[in-house]
Image: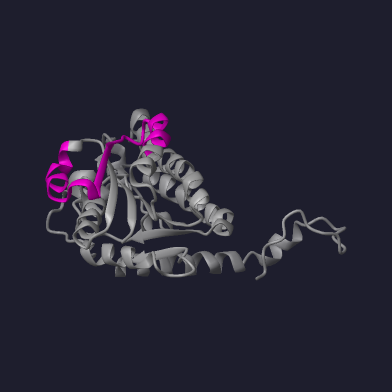
Amino acid sequence: MKTWFITGISSGFGRLMTEKLLATGDRVAGTLRDLSAADDLKAQYGDRLWLAALDLTHTGEIRPTADAAWAAMGNIDVVVSNAGYGLLGAAEEVTDEQVRHQIDTNLLGAIQLVRAVLPHMREQGHGRILQVSSLGGQVTIPGSSLYHATKWGIEGFMETVAQEVAVFGIGCTIVEPGSARTGFRSRSAKVGPRIPAYDASPSRRINHILNDTSLHSPGDPGKMVDTMIASVVEEPAPLRLTLGSDSYQHITRTLTTRLAQLQAQRDLACSTDCADQGNSPRFFQPDEN
């Protein structure tokens, strides 16, 4: 039996993961903005489900909530930073308030959650953190600039944290699902007000995708959640977990193109070094292991 701390359990991956874990005998400390959305699970599973109301934009409440979860559960093996949503529309179209809310939820809230749970994991000497990102943490799609800003940001944060905390027995995995049938488009996505000039921009395609109910996501959320759950017993923790054929294809194409562009600039990059290199140690030397 494992004990899990999961944010955003009212719907999508968070809800499905909570249902699966409780059904197999694990314990879950779950957060959501509206506690009534989990009334049915609480009635069915009782003390094996601990609940707390949490809005990640209220960053001052994150650490007390994490502390309360550890106090109630005694020990937590896996933290799943899942809460988040997509803000869609061209960068100029979304409002200042929407920009702030997107960053506060997806990036600052996720960062503060990880910072809040690390002291507990260090003290217990083990733990696993799953950070739910998306293919949008590696790939960019016009009309999603603010969403990408948060996902690219949290991926850089988590990749660094993974190196910082491995010495404490804590593993970190960035989960990159593609489009899945979770209701993301219909329930979770927020859209900025339209500026008519952007009807000529490729960013407008994202609006059409949201409105076209004939389009179906390829990803099976049940299979994706099963894979996330199974990953926590892998040693060492996989740094990234790419889920869905669309995620794999888009990320492969993006990284291949980026590598080719980088390699084409090798001589240019090296030409900008100082002339007096010698054998002196470098300020930053990449780990060659």
Side of 124 relative to 146 (left or right): right
Above/below status of 280 relative to 6: below
208 or 135, nearer to the observer: 135
Residue 190 spot, x, y in % from top left:
26, 40
Tell me, yes or no, whether the highlighted magenta stretch contains residue 44: yes
| Residue lying at 37% horizontally and 60% vertically, measured from the top left | 176
Q: Which residues are magenta?
A: 36-65
Quarter occupied by the C terminus:
bottom right
Side of 159 relative to 109 (left or right): right
Tell me, yes or no, whether the highlighted magenta stretch contains residue 275: no
Quarter residue 86 falls in: top left
Q: How many marks?
A: 0
Q: Is residue 106 visible?
A: yes
39 or 91, nearer to the observer: 39
Q: Is residue 202 visible?
A: no
Residue 24 spot, x, y in % from top left:
22, 63
| Residue lying at 12% horizontally and 58% vertically, measured from the top left | 214
Residue 146 spot, x, y in % from top left:
39, 42
